[in-house]
Image: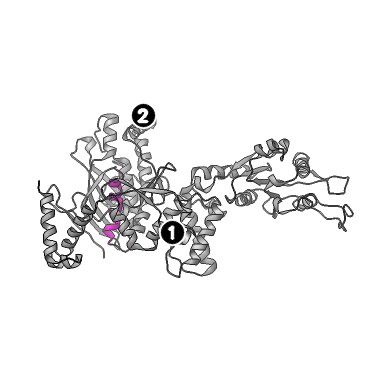
């Protein structure tokens, strides 16, 4: 049984220290969380693990809250903010379980409160945490100091007669429910916005609230009316597609809109973005899905054969044409024809394609008669057709015909938030097909992928994951150096928080990822002087030896006299 009762936790501290109230803090070290907060100013992005986050000033939140309440009313605004917080809390519970696996359950629970503090939302001081996971029992009392939400509400409306930390209540409910595996509801019983010295919340299982005769829709205690976690879209998974970024979903929405029709579709995007996957999705969602999809790469067909391959040939049309045969358009009659790399077609073939699109007619090579075909055409190109028209290599009239319904698929560097789930998909495929056991990726590997620009897009990412998995042994975790064959492949760097709150360059370094000791040294020296490092080493040696100078000296490779001398020097430096 796991039970944590009456934990006197006051003030966050990375190590046990005296607090302003004379008590001692035992909150876990926050460095594992702060290390997952990374700033990429060269991309205009901030990441918390594999989630993109933004930094907003409080004035923006004040304006948003005021407009929301004035537009939809306070009750609806309360539900909207609660549900938003619930979704965020549910998602971050996954981060807690990932980062603090194998640690005491209390440490995992405290990820949520510590993330609140890291983001500047509120400082959480647990007063009581009484949990029995096996029995499904949960009870906690948490004190909030410096609540940004309470401050926002006061700035917007000048205070309140009831608690107002609706989003933070939603976060606590979603986060704890995900960790417990059962619905947990929190109620704010004291709020700084309504005259309290601090904010204070109480959490129980929904069953316990009901048994106590408490209404769950009071004080932001309602359970969410919408799904709390952004889960994978079943329709996307059915197509073998992964993506949640706004630009990707916008493109996918266009696929769903046009698929039931017979409209010609032009898929635009760089090499490797998944144009064929989109083409297959168009076909599978169309009335023609019962028939085969025909996929043709125009660039793979020699110029001398492109007409006969696409439109067919009559016997004797040219030397070697010993029999009449149909082309791909006739084969695809009643179905869908996907023409990849359409920009490589000759001008003659383009003219014939235009006639098919306009009239639904084809003419075989060597024939003087036409045949009607009912073919839905989906084209793809990585060429800028406007530039090709200007260069005289593409017909303007065909371009206008193809662009009746264009869909631009974004490159992977513009949808970096989709990289982690794509990696999971490719790694699962590799494990299923090879039977190998690969544990996953290190945080350094994920960081390296988030920084890389992927000129080959999704295809390159899939190949990188496969290569890295091959290089690992069974049971090993993929690290950054498994992914890149050359260290200079990655020139960008994140900025990550240091212990003193400053941001430091966290440039990917193969040596550091190869050798964890080097990585630890690199982290130790960043932003510190040699004197600072020496002081920290002495303090730590004394801490782990309970103040025994002789043992601490042996730990540091010094004589007792040498350590005594350094301690006297440090004492003088610290004296006012």
Q: Position of residue 69 (x, y in %)?
A: 35, 32
Specify the color scheme.
one colour
Kindly state the secondary structure of the residue where label 1 is placed. Answer: helix
Q: Position of residue 506 (x, y in %)?
A: 37, 51
Q: Is residue 178 left or right of residue 539?
A: right
Q: Nearer the viewer, residue 464 or 70?
A: 464
Q: Position of residue 380 (x, y in %)?
A: 65, 46
Q: Is residue 32 left or right of residue 238?
A: left
The residue carrying pointer 1 sits among few (fewer than 14), some (14 to 19) or many (20 or more) residues within 10 Å by Cα, namely many
Q: Earlier in the sequence, mark 1 or mark 2?
A: 2
- Which disc is residue 70 wearing? 2
Q: Nearer the viewer, residue 547 or 160?
A: 547
Q: Is residue 572 magenta?
A: no
| Residue bounds of the magenta highlight | 102-119
Q: Position of residue 368 (x, y in %)?
A: 88, 45
Q: Is residue 58 above or below residue 52?
A: above
Query: Which secondary structure dominates the residues rendered in magenta?
Result: helix
From the image, tell me which residue sits under label 1.
Answer: 480
């Amino acid at each position: 049984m796991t039970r944590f009762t009456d934990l006197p936790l006051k003030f966050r501290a990375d190590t046990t220290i005296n607090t302003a109230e004379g008590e001692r803090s035992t909150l876990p070290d926050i460095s594992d969380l702060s290390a997952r907060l990374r700033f990429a100013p060269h991309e205009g992005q901030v990441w918390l693990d594999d989630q993109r986050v933004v930094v907003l000033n409080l004035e923006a939140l004040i304006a948003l809250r005021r407009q929301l309440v004035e537009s939809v009313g306070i009750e609806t605004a309360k539900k909207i903010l609660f549900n938003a917080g619930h979704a965020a809390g549910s998602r971050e519970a996954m981060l807690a379980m990932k980062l603090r696996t194998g640690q005491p359950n209390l440490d995992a629970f405290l990820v949520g409160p510590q993330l609140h503090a890291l983001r500047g939302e509120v400082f959480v001081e647990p007063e009581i945490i009484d949990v029995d996971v096996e029995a499904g029992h949960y009870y906690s009392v948490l004190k909030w100091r410096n609540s940004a939400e309470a401050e926002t509400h006061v700035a917007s409306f000048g205070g309140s007669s009831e608690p107002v930390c609706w989003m933070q209540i939603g976060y606590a409910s979603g986060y704890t429910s995900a960790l417990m595996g059962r619905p947990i509801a929190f109620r704010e019983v004291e709020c700084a916005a309504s005259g309290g010295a601090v904010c204070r919340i109480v959490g129980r299982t929904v069953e316990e609230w009901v048994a106590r005769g408490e209404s769950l829709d009071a004080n932001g205690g309602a359970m969410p009316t919408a799904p709390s976690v952004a889960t994978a879209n079943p329709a996307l998974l059915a197509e073998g597609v992964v993506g949640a970024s706004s630009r990707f979903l916008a493109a996918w929405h266009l696929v769903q809109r046009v698929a039931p029709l017979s409209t010609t579709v032009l898929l635009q995007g760089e090499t490797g973005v998944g144009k064929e996957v989109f083409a297959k999705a168009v076909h599978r969602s169309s009335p023609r899905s019962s028939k085969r999809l025909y996929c043709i790469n125009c660039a793979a067909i020699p110029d001398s054969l492109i007409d006969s391959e696409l439109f067919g040939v009559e016997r004797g049309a040219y030397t070697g044409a010993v029999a009449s045969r149909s082309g791909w358009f006739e084969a695809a009659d009643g179905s869908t024809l996907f023409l990849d790399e359409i920009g490589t077609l000759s001008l003659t073939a383009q003219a014939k394609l235009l006639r098919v699109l306009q009239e639904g007619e084809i003419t075989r090579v060597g024939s003087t008669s036409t045949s009607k075909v009912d073919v839905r055409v989906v084209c793809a190109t990585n060429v800028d057709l406007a530039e090709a028209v200007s260069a005289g290599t593409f017909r303007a009239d065909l371009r206008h015909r193809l662009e009746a319904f264009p869909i631009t698929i974004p490159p992977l560097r513009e949808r970096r938030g989709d990289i982690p789930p794509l990696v999971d998909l490719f790694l699962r495929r590799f494990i299923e097909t090879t039977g190998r056991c690969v544990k996953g990726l290190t945080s350094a590997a994920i960081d390296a992928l988030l920084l890389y620009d992927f000129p080959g897009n999704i295809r390159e990412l899939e190949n990188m994951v496969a290569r890295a998995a091959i290089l690992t042994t069974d049971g090993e975790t993929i690290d950054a150096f498994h992914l890149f064959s050359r260290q200079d492949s990655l020139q960008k760097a994140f900025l990550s928080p240091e212990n003193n709150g400053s941001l430091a360059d966290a440039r990917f370094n193969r040596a550091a990822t190869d050798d964890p000791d080097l990585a630890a040294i690199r982290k130790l020296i960043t932003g510190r002087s040699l004197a600072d490092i020496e002081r920290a080493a002495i303090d730590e040696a004394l801490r782990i030896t309970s103040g025994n100078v002789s043992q601490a000296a042996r730990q540091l490779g010094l004589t007792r006299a040498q350590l005594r001398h350094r301690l006297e020097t440090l004492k003088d430096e610290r004296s006012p």
